[in-house]
Image: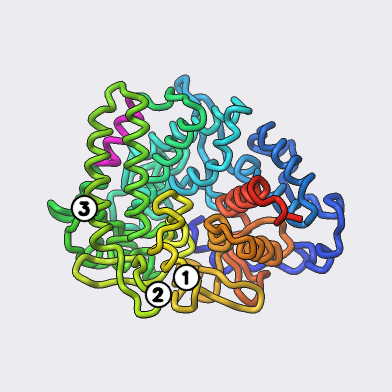
């Protein structure tokens, strides 16, 4: 089933433990068992289980401890399919309630587990398998964002999408971040393990294709080979002007027809994703320097492209706001048109330091942060239960827990981090898990009851607080 079907999924009466009962619970055993039963889990990591026990033992807030124990392992419990194919580990990772693998989601879902690879070689094999599977996906079609495990499966979008759709592709929405996330995962894996065995000739071919695709979408030599149209009533699911999008003046930035929310861009130069591209290309250069074998040209090409995109960002990403001063735009077109907003999905303006794309101390980022966390951002919503960022994908007044998590992950202020933890605790609708979004005035009105990226990201946030500011969990 496609993602839009889950946009108005409301918690049913009796499906979740009442909030009053949760507040009265005093020990972990007082909470219902909502995590997948051990016998039904897709994968179990001893290192992950040890972290869960350790963190839960030291969180006096038992509801938060229960939520962490449910959410942190959710990707491993429910979404991974690991096997050995042609002598290499291969891991297919679904996003949750949609049986397809997004390059973005799959990378983000396993990212927090990387730091545990040295303690758990089976977990290391699992993540190596994700890298290998992503290589296959990129080589199949670098413009696609989501794939099936069955490489011969025909997409449900075949009859509605006007684009070059191949078997094995679930959806073909061109998003810069789809090619950045696999590089981030590969680089993070190598940094932690020192293992370069996944980075073979096929991986090198995929990296060359990523650079080629980025260059095509700079559009210095025409519109490039990609176009996309969809027969739909959802305006954000299609691309105007014969599927090439509104005009953009070539300036070195990379065009992205879709945002990481899978919604179409208004102006093709999506600033957070271009920042992410610079970081990914820099990571690729560093990784190729460690591999050396037949990757020297890739490293040189990545460095050259990163330099061009960075220069274009320096020239086009910042605008002067009458209230906030210099801030980063969300989208531009090179002709002077600007879209000021932020979306909950990452890369976002809010999440740039999380992706190491800008420094947290960057004064332009700090100004931008004030803007995106204010009512001046059209997709910042504040209601009876919470405040946070949403986006067009789930509609007005729908806050994404991901934005609250990202706010906490990119903050050094104890009060703000505690606010984020408290807000997430009171808006999970008694389910013990994160959701895609919830209504600002009614958390029991939420979308996507099974969204593994948000669950794992929440676990990453709590684990980070536990390591760095454990007193906030008391």
Q: Secondary structure at mark 3?
A: loop
CB under 8 Å between callouts 1 and 2?
yes
Residue 206 painted magenta: yes
Q: Residue at x 59, y 61 (%)?
A: 413
User: Mark 2, residues whose alpha carbon is within 10 Å: few (<14), some, or many (≥20)?
Assistant: some
Q: Which residue is mark 3?
A: 218
The magenta region covers: 201-211
Position above or below: 467 against 389:
above
Quadrant (top left/top right/bottom left/bottom right) for the C terminus:
bottom right
CB under 8 Å between callouts 2 and 3?
no
Q: Which residue is mark 1?
A: 370
Q: Foreground mark, 2 or 3?
A: 2
Can residue 227 be seen here? The reply is no
Q: Nearer the viewer, residue 112 or 44?
A: 112
Q: Image quarter for residue 16?
A: bottom right
Q: Which residue is mark 2?
A: 324
Residue 200 in the figure: left or right of residue 309: right
Position above or below: 409 against 383:
above
Can residue 229 be seen here? The reply is yes
Marks 1 and 2, the one that precedes in the sequence: 2
Q: Secondary structure at mark 1?
A: helix
Q: Residue at x 35, y 48 (%)?
A: 144
Magenta span: predominant SS is helix
């Amino acid at each position: 089933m496609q993602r839009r079907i889950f946009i108005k999924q409301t918690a049913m009466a009796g499906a979740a433990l009442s909030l009053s009962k949760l507040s009265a619970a005093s020990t972990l055993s007082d909470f219902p068992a909502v995590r997948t039963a051990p016998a039904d889990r897709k994968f179990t990591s001893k290192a992950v289980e040890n972290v869960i026990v350790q963190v839960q033992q030291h969180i006096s807030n038992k509801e938060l401890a229960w939520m962490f124990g449910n959410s942190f392992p959710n990707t491993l419990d429910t979404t991974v399919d690991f096997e050995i194919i042609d002598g290499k580990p291969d891991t297919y990772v679904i996003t949750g309630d949609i049986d397809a693998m997004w390059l973005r989601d799959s990378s983000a879902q396993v990212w927090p587990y990387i730091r545990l690879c040295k303690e758990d070689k089976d977990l290391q094999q699992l993540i190596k398998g994700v890298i290998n599977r992503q290589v296959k996906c990129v080589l199949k079609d670098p413009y696609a964002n989501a794939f099936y495990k069955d490489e011969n499966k025909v997409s449900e979008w075949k009859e509605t999408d006007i684009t070059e759709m191949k078997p094995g592709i679930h959806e073909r929405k061109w998003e810069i971040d789809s090619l950045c996330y696999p590089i981030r995962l590969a680089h993070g894996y190598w940094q932690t393990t020192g293992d370069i065995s996944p980075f073979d000739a096929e991986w090198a071919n995929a990296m060359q294709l990523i650079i080629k695709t980025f260059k095509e979408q700079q559009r210095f030599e025409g519109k490039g080979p990609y176009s996309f149209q969809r027969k739909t009533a959802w305006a954000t699911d299609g691309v105007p002007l014969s599927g090439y999008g509104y005009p953009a003046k070539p300036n070195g930035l990379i065009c992205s027809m879709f945002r990481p929310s899978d919604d179409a861009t208004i102006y093709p130069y999506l600033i957070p994703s271009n920042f992410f591209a610079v970081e990914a290309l820099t990571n690729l250069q560093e990784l190729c320097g460690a591999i050396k074998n037949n990757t020297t040209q890739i490293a040189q090409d990545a460095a050259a492209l990163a330099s061009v995109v960075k220069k274009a960002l320096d020239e086009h990403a910042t605008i002067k706001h009458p209230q906030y001063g210099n801030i980063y735009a969300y989208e531009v077109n090179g002709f002077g048109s600007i879209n000021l907003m932020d979306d909950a999905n990452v890369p976002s303006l809010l999440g740039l330091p999380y992706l190491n794309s800008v420094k947290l101390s960057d004064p332009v980022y700090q100004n931008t942060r004030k803007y995106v966390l204010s009512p001046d951002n059209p997709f910042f919503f504040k209601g009876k239960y919470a405040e946070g960022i949403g986006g067009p994908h789930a509609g007005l007044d729908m806050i994404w827990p991901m934005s609250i998590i990202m706010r906490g992950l990119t903050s050094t202020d104890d009060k703000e981090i505690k606010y984020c933890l408290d807000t997430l605790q009171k808006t999970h609708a008694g389910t013990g898990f994160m959701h895609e979004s919830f209504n600002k005035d009614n958390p029991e009105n939420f979308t996507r009851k099974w969204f593994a990226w948000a669950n794992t990201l929440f676990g990453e946030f709590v684990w980070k607080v536990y390591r760095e500011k454990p007193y906030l969990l008391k």
